[in-house]
Amino acid sequence: MEEERGTATRTAIIAGCTGLIGTACLDIILNEDRYAKVVALSRRPLHREHPRLENKVVDFDRLEEFIEDIRLDDAYCCLGTTIKQAGSQEAFKKVDYEYVMRFARCAREAGAKRLMLVSAVGVSADSRIFYNRVKGEVERDVKQLGYPVLHIFRPSLLLGNRREFRFGERVAAVFMKVLKPLMIGGWTRYRGISGLRVARAMRAAAFSGKEGLHTHEYRDMQELTGGR
């Protein structure tokens, strides 16, 4: 049975809370009154105050040491980078595969029952495209961790104001706005979506009461957030 609003009973943990989706997700779950505590993992102090927030500055290579004493209910994974930002395919895989899997594994060992994981549209562990293959490998392997509830979110182009300027995304966003009315049927999944909507969908999924594995693409995330 789901908790009534106003009853703070759960503890959540979030990784990747400084990116486009993660920033929005942290704001949303901090203001979710069914969470008694939100543990935010970051490599540098977040420099923000909230009565429910516990900010842990961590080394993701030794994550086990930092969260071994926490008991959790929900885990939100918004970790992710780009090959350009990381500097190499090896460095990209360290963040998008190794750190994601370490976070998911540690959270499960700390008692988390629900995992909300940001992936990407079109991923496959068998893909010839490196980015899609790494994301697909994460999806494949995280399913083996034994989460009673696993929600995977597969956005396409992310819309919103990032801290860093990405010229390619700005150009793509303009074209996406023009092409959106034509992206119907099977192409709907490739529509651009705001990081804020993805974050709202993650919180909605966490409290949906659904068990098992659920994969959410554009239309699903729209429905989870009431189309707003």
Image (cartoon, rainbow, N blue to C red):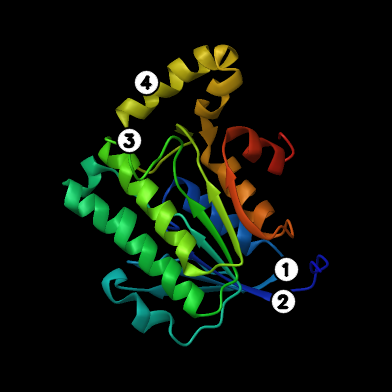
- The x, y position of residue 223, in whole percent, is 71, 38
Question: Could you tell me the amino acid type at mark 4?
Answer: Val
Q: Residues within 10 Å of mark 4 (few under 14, many from 20)?
A: few
Q: Which mark is residue 9?
A: 2
Residue 11 shows up from this direction: yes
The quadrant in which the C terminus is found is top right
Circle 4 residue: 171
How far is mark 1 from mark 3, CA to CA? 35 Å
* Residue 79 visible: no
Along the viewing direction, whichever of 36 and 131 lies nearer the viewer? 131
Say what amino acid the circle numbered 1 marks. Arg
Q: Residue at x 53, y 21 (%)?
A: 187
Q: Earlier in the sequence, mark 2 or mark 3?
A: 2
User: Which residue position holds label 1?
Assistant: 34
Distance between the Cα atoms at labels 2 and 3?
Answer: 39 Å
Q: Which mark is residue 13?
A: none
The quadrant of the picture occupied by the N terminus is: bottom right
